[in-house]
Amino acid sequence: MRWLSQLRMKTQVLFGRRREIARLENELAFHLERQIAENIAAGMNAADARTAALRTFGNPALLREQTHATWSWNGLESLLHDVRYSARSLCRAPEFLGLAVGVMALGIGANVALFTVVRSVLLKPLPYTDSEQLVTLYEADSHHKGAHRHLPVDFGSFDIWQSTARAHADLTAVSPFQDYNVSAEGGRLPEKIKAAWSTWDFFPVLGVTPAMGRSFTAQDDRPDAAATVMLTHGFWMRRYNGDPAIVGKTIWLDAKPYAVIGVLPASFMFSSAFGGNTVQVWAPVRHEAPPWLISTFEDHEFLVVGRLRHGTTLPMLVGQLDALQKQIQKSHAKPTVHDGAAGHSTLDDAVETYKTPLYALLAATGCVLLIACMNVAGLLVARAAARSKDQAIRAALGGGRLRLIRERLIESLLLSAGGGALGLLLAWCALQWLLHARSDMNRVDAIQIDGVVGAFTACIIAVCALFSGLIAALSSTGKDVLSALQESSRAHSGGKARAQLRRLLLALQVGLTVVLLVGAGLLLKSYQRLRSSDLGVPVDNVLTMQLSLPDARYKQPAQQAAFFEHLIERVRGLPGVERAALVSTAPGEGWNGDQTMSVIEHPPLPMTEMPDIAVRGADPGYFAAIELPLLRGRIFTSDERLDRAHVVVLSRLAARALFKDEDPLGKHIKASTGTTTYEVVGVVGDTLWNVGEPPMPTLYWPIYGNNYSFATIVVRSTHDVESLALPMQRVVSALDPDLPVSDVMTLQEAIGKSTIDSAFDSMLVLAFAVIALLLAATGLYGVLAYLVAQRTNEIGIRIALGARRENVLRLMLADGLRPALFGLVTGLAASAVVVRQIQAMLYETAPLDPTVYAAVTATLLLVAALACLLPAWRASRLDPMQALRSE
Amino acid sequence: MGKPNDLVQGTLDLLILKTLLPAAMHGWAIAKRIQQISGEVLQVQQGSLYPALHRLEQQGWIKAKWQESETGRQAKFYALTAAGRKQLENETANWNRLSTAINLIVGEI
């Protein structure tokens, strides 16, 4: 029971401390009263009795304190006392408080925000059952020269993979590249939506159960089954207002009826390296895909997602599939059949592209935090220097060294905690902005501040407090109390040592800043390169708009061609349209199809050496509208359509790939998969299919007749081309009210879209670098101002003895610039090593780009000189008489 | 005059516990009683008494209660707890062992 009474006492003195203190007073007073009473009884008068009693009683304050000291929680009490004391003394220096808390808030906020992103996007498991068992598999090809190691899979190979690997993994196929036109119904506009086809077991393998209705079954996933579709939660909420009776209803996709069998849960989101997070509806692949697509080995439209069985590892599975794919390639020896397999975890598949940039950003924020800590440590050192006498007196009066260090630490803990709280708020704002600005990023919806982030913030606060507090504390609690007490303004041994420490901190800050600046400079330059990369055609005032005709309504090629011709004629008639044309895919707007081609007049090449050429359908007006220069021959004519559409125009690269230096005009080519031969009639310039990727050899054939059911309208205007979007949409809906348009954007916007990653990364790193530069500059200013204040006397003597003011200026400037120069050199050296890590993020920019390094050096020197100029100038303007008198 | 400070460390605790064995008392009474029983040899100073009382209370050997004193004023009365009784036994045994040992040495010379 003893522990119970101990506990009772502990709670009493913890929560009723005031009452306990009053009781102690009462108890002691009672004792005194009895003593007085006894003295009076012994014959003294009241006054003498009291005096005598007080004398025997001794020092009441000491007694009170000694008794008090036996209570529990004294450590806590003195801690609280120190906290109160530190808070009060911080509040007395509001500028210092504001500066230090602000600096910490920037550093901590940036780190917390980035940590949240890295954790939510890269580290948190995917929201599927046992998601670490999920893998995404691709094909690989030893002849493939592109940057991407992972190639999509053909359904023929998938079928073989699935049945062969059944003992080791459950494999499913997904094609997230599909789209449908949703017909206008119930007052809703038609729209074109992204869709995915999957094998029926895709959702069971992921472990996703629908929020409403049911998943696909094997019966749905057959060519002769009834058409079924599952809606994503977002699409169901948006288009059908969350209609609770949607399951069982019929919706019209591409002018065909589909029964809605289920709605996916809100948490479900499919992301892959090939997109997928904009998919709105899911449909069973064997019902949707044309028969040839699910038996071919040559058309690669699928990703394979699998769940490893117990005891199987990813390398085992990939090894097995790789061997299998080599056999498949042998038995179907064609250049378009791949000869290998590759794969990684499904999580990696979704986020691999973000890894390097996010970790680079995290490293940048880490630098900012380190700089912020050093900055605050520098401020604390200066503060400690200003209070060195006060500290020395306390030490002389018996203040324990540890207690003094503890006070420093508490002070820096208060600063960091304030900064952390403010930083958390900043991080929250930053994340809201990110969710808004980067909704295209995979898994961006998983970003949230949770308990782990809170714990991380607490850790950062503690580390920052320790780091900056210890530097300051160790610099200020020298053992030589006496020398500090004696140190007059004329003898600065302690002050000098402290300034040395601050200079070192400063050099480190400058070094880190230089690394950040170099990183930002390289990314910025790379971004500029990307933005200014030449698409091959003038990009100003060009609007593009896509549409695709549903097979169900436009069955015949002649119907499609007639619709397109009718459409483009009407668009050309719109006021403001200078030129308009149709093309299957506009420059800079994606890959969209390639074929291996051979020349009829040449001896047949081995399959692997046939050139791979991007294929575009275009109408005769396209080249003039987009201003793609004709280099040789002619463009096709408007009557080369349907049965007569067997002519092609090659891009310069395509002509070289097929014909080397030969004259291509009049020669014939054919696709390796087809039988039709095409006559080459002209050669035009090259265009980029995507900004940041090398140009691809391209051929153009007439869009009227080469089986095109989709097209991009390209419109060039002299000004305000965006304002044509609405009239163009009206033209389309006048021709077919069920036909939606999509991807309405200018070529400029298309470029912006494909450079958004680069823009985002370079802007953020630049922002961090600027923050770092500001911090370093204030640090530099602070140190020099402090040095000048310390040396006021000395400078006064120098001037009095005849030193010229320019000399004083030069002396002080050199003093301030030395750490900056030292930091600059270290920083440049460190950058040269560090930037190799971000090489993958750079486009046409060498990691050791001399202009960037030169610009960084110049910027830093300029900022450092500006920061040092004011204190140095002040020093040179000192009035010697006043300087000498000042103590 | 032997002051408690000169006593063997911890002896004051023993004296207080022993004094409280028969009945609960307030601080003044404890000091008086020790003085009386020791034949005025041991004078407990307030400076030692109250810290000791509070320490014993914090450790749970004794517990305090506010009640009316003989003069009619409210005073803090200390009483032994069960744990305190056991502690008294231990400390008495310790003291006996120690004093016998010291007596042996002192008596020898």
Image (tube, helix red, strand yellow):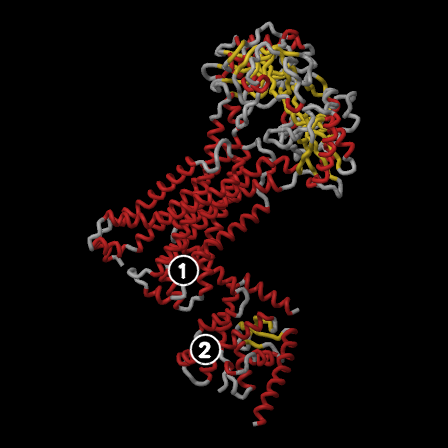
Q: Chain of mark 2?
A: A
State how far apart marks 2 and 1 are (Cα).
42 Å
Residue drawn at the location 79% of the way across and 26% of the way down:
A219
Residue on which disc 1 sits: A476
Q: How many numbered discs sit on the rendered protein?
A: 2
> Which percent across, then down, holds residue A779?
39, 48
In this view, the residue in front, B93 or A222, is: A222
User: In the image, residue A780 lies at what x, y percent?
Assistant: 37, 47
In this rendered view, identify the residue nearer to me: B86 or A23: B86
Kind of element beneath mark 2: helix
Residue A291 found in image quarter: top right
Mark 2 highlights which residue? A57
User: Image height check: is B41 above or below A212?
Assistant: below
Residue A399 lies left or right of residue A626; in this view the side is left
Dividing the picture into quadrants, the one containing residue A188 is top right
Nearest the eye: B15 or A390: A390
Instruction: Tell me which residue sits at (73%, 25%) in the image.
Output: A332
The residue under label 1 is which amino acid type? Ser
Location of residue A34 in the rendering, given as x and y in whole percent from the top left corner: 49, 78
Residue A334 tag number: none
The residue type indicated by label 2 comes to Phe
Q: Is residue A856 left or right of residue B35?
A: left
Pick whichever of labels 2 and 1 is earlier in the sequence. 2
Look at the picture and state if A328 lies above or below A720.
below
Within 10 Å of disc 1 (Cα), the crowding (few <14, some 14-19, many 20+) is many
Q: Quadrant of the N terminus of chain A?
A: bottom right
Q: Do callouts 2 and 1 mark residues in contact (Cβ within 8 Å)?
A: no
